[in-house]
Image (tube, grey):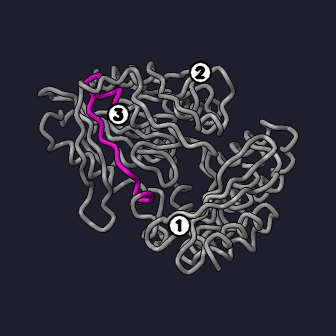
Amino acid sequence: MSATKQAVDAIEAITARRFDELVGRFAPSVRTMITPDVLRAGWTTATVTLGAYVGAGEPVEEPAGAGMVLVKVPVTFTNGMVVALVTVTGNGELAGLQLAPAQPPQDWQPPSYADTSAFVEHELTLGSDALAVPGTLTVPVGDGPWPAVVVLPGSGPTDRDSTIGPNKPLKDLAWGLASRGVAVLRFDKVTHAHPAEVRADRNFTVLDEYRAAALAAVAELVVTKGIDPDRIVLLGHSLGGTVAPRIAAQAPGLAGLVLFAAGAEPLYWAAIRQIRYIAELDPATSAGADSVLATMTEQARRVDDPALTADTPAALLPFGQPAPYWLDLRDHDPVRAAAALRVPILVVNGGRDYQVTIADDLARWRAGLADRADVTIREYPADNHLFFPSDEPSTPAEYQRLQHVDGAVVADVAEWVSSLV
């Protein structure tokens, strides 16, 4: 079967909600991560956001490397158009399926608060084994010694910039901090750099997503000329913030911790809340999310069940992730782990954030860290999960237009890090 035919059939299957059939079209190496419920949740989110499916346009093929073909299929909904990106292997199996904005993304541009003459960047590799990852060190111009931040990106196979649409929020942050005298080391997650190896390891955990690269980054900064080894800070965004206290406990000598829209509510329950929020943005289509939410709730309860074991089939669990991943995440209380640290902590959250919210997440950090005099908590009412400011309700669609991290947030983080002694 040709790549185009496979892509067209995949679009027909998902629009007809034949999710079980579609799973069987994926290559075995990918199939372990794909379940009917994962596809159902993704399609429901798309229809809730974009409206009812109308039809598909003419597919276009282009080479994707490693003998694979990328087929781009325009897909029209009542409220807009996207492009289905269908990756097909040389054997005619699916290797990927996602929806992307129909218009070519704008090129990222530096934020106004970044002074490109004030810093330099160096590429480096963190780790020496098969799972080593690339990173970028952004250093202020001058002799220093400069305080430095190691950045842990959010969930998913995220690159060092947390690229989404035309936006690169962690690059905004790095360039903004370096313009204010703070060095920044950011890196591609191992799930981005080595997806096949990660998929092949059923025992891979959320800690494995971060620990090796993060500890290597801290070690790298300690011996880097111009960096103050006594002022190295860990900053975790979203899921990276959830895991950051565990990493900090294994990195003695850190000067502080920044929880940057860090999740405190269990991820599998937070996902349900997020889907419900997105569904309620359009009451006309919200009923379509009920079955997905019911399935996700059942899966979340299964994670919380004391009877969960490492042998529980991944198909019964959230996002088709194997049980060891959820066992590890379930047993980690990020607030308690942060409270046990003996370093200053800065907690920041956006008021428009529907992914990590003031009510569900920041409230937990606030309560668990209430007796710590060295904890600073700041809210930014206009900002969303990526700290993009606006006066509109936050939606997934807003991430597809070019924006920048709130300059006030960057300035406040820089000031807090620079004040550490």
| In this rendering, position of residue 370 left or right of residue 340 | right
Q: Residues within 10 Å of mark 1 (few under 14, many from 20)?
A: many
Quadrant assignment, res 372: top left
Earlier sequence position, callout 2 versus callout 1 = 1
Is residue 198 part of the magenta span, yes or no? no
Earlier sequence position, callout 3 versus callout 1 = 3
Q: Amino acid at mark 1?
A: Pro
Q: Whole-percent x and y of residue 139? A: 23, 33
The residue at which mark 2 appears reads as 382
Question: Are the residues at dot 2 and dot 3 in contact (C-beta closer than 8 Å)?
Answer: no
Question: What's the residue at 46%, 72% (across, down)?
Answer: 201
Question: What's the residue at 59%, 20% (across, down)?
Answer: 381
Q: Whole-percent x and y of residue 250? A: 32, 50
Q: Disc 2 versus disc 3: distance between alpha carbons?
A: 21 Å
Q: Amino acid at mark 2?
A: Ala
Residue 373 appearing in the image: no
Question: What's the residue at 55%, 81% (across, down)?
Answer: 91
Q: Amino acid at mark 3?
A: Ala
Q: Disc 3 versus disc 1: distance between alpha carbons?
A: 33 Å
Region in magenta: 175-192
- The quadrant in which the C terminus is found is top left
User: Which element is circle 3 on?
Assistant: helix
Give the answer, above or below, for where 326 lies relative to 181: below
Which is nearer the eye, 296 or 91? 91
Quadrant assignment, res 148: top left
The residue at which mark 1 appears reads as 324
Label disc, if present, on residue 288 of the rendered structure? none
Which is nearer the eye, 51 or 340? 51
- The quadrant in which the N terminus is found is bottom right
Q: Residues within 10 Å of mark 2 (few under 14, many from 20)?
A: some
Question: Are the residues at dot 2 and dot 1 in contact (C-beta closer than 8 Å)?
Answer: no
Which is nearer the eye, 379 or 44? 44
